[in-house]
Structure formats: structure tokens, C-alpha cells
């Protein structure tokens, strides 16, 4: 195990978030705590409304918690002013959405280059990295295709490449296989796990599917805003 | 990679074309109205607008009307002695029918003192008429009626026959081609056409004043007014005093102003639909780290693109129509007017896009994760 993997890439400590007020208040997260190391993929499971997406949104700097601390790659996300959050997301966070979320009028390669431009990566370097990533993810020859010409699995692979092009500290995947059939979903989830391990990024994977969760290094179960650490099949492995 | 708004505009060019066509129709309307306005304004007033005189002296009871004004020519020498006055001329107008070699034509006869303010100083062909004679400069448009240098023009009502010595261009009055002659010839033609205006002393309609370098126009205006108890108008005011000019100018200007207002509405609607339609996509881009400013700029670019296409297309369309219009049709499209209108439409497009673009800042990027 490398020294880097001893570090903590993502730290959530005592994080709480409540939506609404009074009788209609909903506790999306209650004193939640979580640590993720570089190169570790953590699956977050739980029923709808259990706080999984809120956890991702807070880690990604899209929401501010009511209490607690969130640190990603050494940055105190909760202390960032609103203007700095867009820059934080562009440089430190890789998002994979449920329905790929690719820009439909940009080719696969251009989608990656757009993300690279948000992150401020120089054009030459961005082009090299985009081509390398698309090649690694089995999309060689599809670079110039618009998302509408790609299959669902290919679209999600482009989305994974887009999430990795700027070498983020954390990869946040929100049900990335929900729109795929089981076989393609499993293939995408395996690819995601491989990329997390290969690139040493810390990964958080929200999923309802236990077969997808089984591909993660660790599973955390969310229920009524609380997180319960569970041990999965990989608990005894080196990771 | 080209900027994404450019790529989107190109790859979704069906929408770009639809908006561009709508804006082109609006712009073409505005440009053609501008050309018509410029042409009518020039046709109605350029005889005065092109004058070297800066101030025009009307008789006190004229209410600023050329037709009602009546001043002794001798007043010119009194005004010329005032401080700040460089030169004084006289100018009289008469709209009448003239017999040409091949028929008749409506013209505006304008009498001046040659070499004095208000008189034409140059010709496009031929020569300036000599002082006091019956020579005349005529509008080049009359060539189409068979008028040439040496032609004689006669007023059916009487008065001297005018011999053409040269042609001028761009000097019309009340949308009529002009015939510039001496003040003496004009007085005789006016007396023949309007016997009730005969006078025992030489008269003119207005005095034309050229200011000395460094003279204060307001001071000179007051001096002249005090001397003659007369009404003194600037060149611009004198142009508006031409019958119908003010009403025509304001009506067409209002129509032209209405066009950018409609353009604001069209672009605002287009951009509002764009932001609404792409709300989810814009939210995801914000989640990925794109700033609201950056996305709003993309919307603005996509509002400007069809506006720019529309401005160019409308200009070319208007130029083509002007080229096809008969020479006597009063249209003109000076490039500064077209450029000004183009800038106005571009501003209208930006203004129309601003509010929808600002809505991007209110899109909650966290909403992109609510599906889970």
C-alpha cells in the first residue's frame, strides 16, 4: 500500500443538513462522518430520501451543510465562499451524473475539452489527456461522435472520462448505471472502479444496486440521514 | 476546439436560421424605413441642409415659414455690418411648374445671390451662372427629362426663361428637383406666379448668414433679432421649418425606434426559451464548475450571432432594393445611418438576452443530483 493511500482524500465530520423548517423539516443528514482514501471507491447505498444525494452535493460543494466539516484534498469545502465553489468543482471534483449529462451538441472529445477548459488546463495538454482517456476507456474512434450517436454504455464511459480529465481529488458518481441494463451497468461500474484504483482518485458511488456496490472497496449504508459503515466482500483485501 | 456557443449555434443551426430570419425581417424593415427616411429627409431639406449659411433670418410674422417670410433685400447689408457676421446672402423659394424641352415638371426654383451664403458653390458639370442674369443650375435628375446645358426652362405663368449653365446634385426642396437662379430672376418668376406678392422694393424670403470664425451663434442671433425684430433660425431649425419635414421626420423616426423595441422582445423570447429548454443541461454545467457568467456569456453570444447575421442580410437586402428603385424615388442609405441602426439592433439583442441570461445564476446546480 502506497504512502499516498494512507492519506485521507475526503473527510466528512459531523455533517448535518436539514431541509425546510418546523413541522415540515426533513433531516437529510445527521451527524454524518466518512473518510475516503485516494484510490478507494466507497459505495453509498440506501433507500430514496436517505440522504445519499445530499452527501454527494455537500462533498461536491453544491450544498452547504448546516453543521460539520467537509475536507477534500486538504481544502475545507465548507469554508469556501460561494464564488470559489465553482472553481473548486472545476478543479477538485469529478461528477458523473445518472443520465450521463453530456452536452448533446459537442462531440465526445469536445465534452472532455469543455471540462478541461473549466479547469483551466492548457489546450495542448487537455487534447493529449482527452485522447489518452478516451483510448483507455475503449472509445478510440468515437472521439468525433456526438452523444446521440453513442450507446448508453459509451455515453457513460465518456462521462467517466470527462470526470477524470482534470485529475480531480474526488470522483462523485450519482447512480451512474441507473439508465443502463444490468450487463452494461456492471461493465461501466467495473470500469469506474478500475479508473479509481488506477488514478488514485477517491471515489463515492451512490447506487441502489448491490451488484454495483459489491464492486466498491467499501459500502456505506445511508438510512434516515445517518451513515452506517458496512463491510463488504472486499473488506479483507489489500484495500 | 471552437468556443462552445459557436459550436452550438452551428450544430443547432435550424434554430439559428429561424431566429435570424425573424430578426432579418425586422432589421430589413428598419433599414428600409431608415433609407426611406433618409431619402425623404434629404429630398425635403437638402437644399437648406447643404447650405453654407449657419443662420436663416425670417420676417417676424412668418412663424418660421419660407412661404410666409418676406424681407427687403436691403436688410442684408444692415445685417452684414453686425459683429460676428462674415457674409450675408438672400434666398427665396418657389414651387412651380416649368416647361422642359419634352414636357413639364414640378420644380423648386430657388433664388440666391451668387457667391453669397446659401448659393451653390460648385457644380457636378457645367459652370456657375453669372451674377444677376437668367442663368440657372439644375438638379441632375432633370437630365432624365431631356434637360442639358443650354436648355431653356420656362414657367407657364410667365417670368424670364432660365438658361441651364450647369448641374448640381443632392440639393432638393420639398421632394422636388431644384432650379437655382439669381434672386432677381426668382423675384420675377414669383411675381408672375403669385401676382399678389408683387412688391415695390426688391424682396427676399430669408436672409442667409455665415458667421465669422469664433463668433458666438447665440450672440449673433440676438443681435440680428434686435436689429430687424426678425426670427433667426439655425440651419437645423430652418430645415424643420420646411412644410411637412418635421412631421415626416418624427413619424418615420418613431417607426424606426419601434423596430429595435420589437427586436428586444424577439431576442428576449428566444433567450428565455433557450434557458428554459436547457435548464437541466446548464445546471449540470454549473455543477461541473462552469461559472454562471461564462454560461450567460454563451447565451449572449447566441443572441448576437443571429442579430449580426440579420443586420448584414438586411443591409444587403436594402441596398438591393435601393438599386432597383427608380432614380427619382427618395431613398438613401448612408453607411453611418446603417451602422448606427446595426449597433442599435445589436444592443437590442444584448438587452433582450440579459434577463434570461441572468436567470442562469439562479439555477441551482444541486438540483442536478435530485434524481437519485
Image: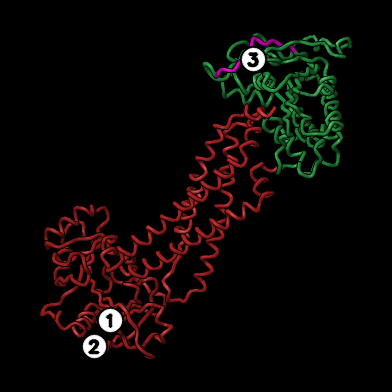
Chain colours: A green, B red
**In the image, what residue occupies the spot 77% across and 34% down?**
A179
State if disc 2 and disc 1 touch (CB < 8 Å): yes
Q: CA distance from mark 1 to mark 2?
A: 9 Å
Residue highlighted by disc 1: B96
Q: Nearer the viewer, residue A136 or A58?
A: A58
- B361 with respect to B142 (left or right): right
Residue highlighted by disc 3: A29
Residue A156, can we see it?
yes
Q: Is residue A29 magenta?
A: yes
Q: Residues within 10 Å of mark 1 (few under 14, many from 20)?
A: some
Q: CA distance from mark 1 to mark 3?
A: 92 Å
Discs 2 and 3 lie in a common subunit: no
Q: CA distance from mark 2 to mark 3?
A: 101 Å
Discs 1 and 2 lie in a common subunit: yes
Which dot marks residue A193?
A: none
Dot placed on the residue nearer the N-terminal end, 1 or 2: 1
Residue highlighted by disc 2: B157
Furthest toward the bottom, the residue is: B102
x and y percentages locating residue B141 in the rendered image: 41, 78
Furthest toward the front, the residue is: A23
Q: Which residues are magenta?
A: A24-35
Amino acid at each position: 500500500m502506497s504512502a499516498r493511500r494512507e492519506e485521507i482524500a475526503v473527510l466528512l465530520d459531523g455533517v448535518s443538513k436539514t431541509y425546510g423548517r418546523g413541522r415540515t423539516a426533513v433531516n437529510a443528514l445527521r451527524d454524518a462522518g466518512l473518510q475516503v482514501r485516494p484510490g478507494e471507491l466507497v459505495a453509498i447505498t440506501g433507500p430514496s430520501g436517505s440522504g445519499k444525494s445530499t452527501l454527494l452535493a455537500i462533498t461536491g460543494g453544491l450544498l452547504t451543510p448546516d453543521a460539520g466539516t467537509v475536507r477534500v484534498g486538504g481544502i475545507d469545502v465548507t469554508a469556501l465562499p460561494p464564488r470559489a465553489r465553482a472553481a473548486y468543482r472545476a478543479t477538485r471534483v469529478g461528477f458523473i451524473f445518472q443520465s450521463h449529462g453530456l452536452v448533446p451538441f459537442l462531440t465526445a472529445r469536445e465534452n472532455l475539452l469543455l471540462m478541461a477548459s473549466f479547469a483551466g488546463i492548457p489546450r495542448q495538454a487537455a487534447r493529449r489527456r482527452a485522447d489518452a482517456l478516451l483510448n483507455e476507456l475503449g472509445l478510440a474512434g468515437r472521439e468525433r461522435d456526438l452523444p446521440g450517436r453513442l450507446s448508453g454504455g459509451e455515453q457513460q464511459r465518456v462521462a467517466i472520462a470527462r470526470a477524470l480529465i482534470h485529475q480531480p481529488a474526488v470522483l462523485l458518481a450519482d447512480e451512474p448505471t441507473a439508465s443502463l441494463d444490468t450487463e452494461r451497468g456492471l461493465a461501466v461500474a467495473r470500469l469506474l472502479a478500475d479508473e479509481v484504483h488506477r488514478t488514485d482518485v477517491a471515489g463515492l458511488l451512490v447506487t441502489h444496486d448491490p451488484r454495483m456496490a459489491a464492486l466498491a472497496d467499501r459500502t456505506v449504508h445511508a438510512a434516515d440521514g445517518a451513515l452506517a459503515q458496512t463491510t463488504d466482500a472486499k473488506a479483507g483485501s489489500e484495500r | 476546439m471552437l468556443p462552445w456557443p459557436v459550436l452550438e449555434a452551428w450544430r443547432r443551426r435550424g434554430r439559428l436560421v429561424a431566429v435570424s430570419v425573424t430578426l432579418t425581417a425586422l432589421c430589413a424593415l428598419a433599414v428600409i424605413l431608415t433609407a426611406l427616411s433618409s431619402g425623404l429627409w434629404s429630398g425635403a431639406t437638402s437644399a437648406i441642409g447643404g447650405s453654407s449659411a449657419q443662420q436663416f433670418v425670417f420676417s417676424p410674422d412668418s412663424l418660421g415659414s419660407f412661404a410666409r417670410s418676406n424681407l427687403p433685400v436691403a436688410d442684408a447689408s444692415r445685417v452684414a455690418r453686425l459683429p460676428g457676421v462674415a457674409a450675408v446672402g438672400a434666398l427665396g423659394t418657389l414651387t412651380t411648374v416649368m416647361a422642359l424641352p419634352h414636357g413639364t415638371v414640378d420644380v423648386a426654383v430657388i433664388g440666391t445671390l451668387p457667391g453669397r451664403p446659401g448659393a451653390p458653390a460648385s457644380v457636378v458639370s457645367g459652370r456657375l451662372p453669372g451674377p444677376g442674369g437668367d442663368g440657372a443650375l439644375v438638379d441632375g435628375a432633370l437630365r432624365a427629362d431631356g434637360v442639358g446645358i443650354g436648355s431653356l426652362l420656362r414657367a407657364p405663368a410667365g417670368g424670364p426663361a432660365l438658361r441651364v449653365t450647369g448641374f448640381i446634385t443632392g440639393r432638393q426642396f420639398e421632394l422636388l428637383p431644384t432650379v437655382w437662379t439669381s434672386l432677381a430672376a426668382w423675384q420675377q418668376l414669383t411675381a408672375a406666379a403669385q401676382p399678389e406678392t408683387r412688391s415695390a422694393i426688391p424682396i427676399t424670403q430669408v436672409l442667409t448668414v455665415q458667421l465669422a470664425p469664433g463668433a458666438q451663434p447665440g450672440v449673433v442671433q440676438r443681435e440680428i433679432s434686435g436689429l430687424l425684430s426678425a426670427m433667426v433660425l439655425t440651419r437645423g431649425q430652418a430645415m424643420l421649418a420646411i412644410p411637412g419635414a418635421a412631421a415626416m421626420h418624427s413619424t418615420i423616426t418613431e417607426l424606426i425606434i419601434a423596430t429595435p423595441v420589437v427586436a428586444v422582445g424577439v431576442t428576449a423570447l428566444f433567450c428565455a426559451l433557450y434557458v428554459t429548454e436547457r435548464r437541466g443541461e446548464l445546471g449540470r454545467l454549473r455543477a461541473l464548475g462552469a461559472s454562471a457568467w461564462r454560461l450567460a456569456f454563451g447565451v449572449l453570444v447566441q443572441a448576437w450571432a443571429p442579430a449580426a447575421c440579420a443586420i448584414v442580410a438586411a443591409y444587403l437586402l436594402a441596398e438591393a432594393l435601393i438599386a432597383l428603385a427608380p432614380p427619382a424615388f427618395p431613398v438613401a442609405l448612408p453607411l453611418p445611418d446603417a451602422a448606427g441602426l446595426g449597433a442599435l439592433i445589436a444592443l437590442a439583442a444584448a438587452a433582450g438576452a440579459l434577463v434570461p441570461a441572468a436567470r442562469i445564476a439562479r439555477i441551482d446546480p444541486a438540483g442536478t443530483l435530485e434524481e437519485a
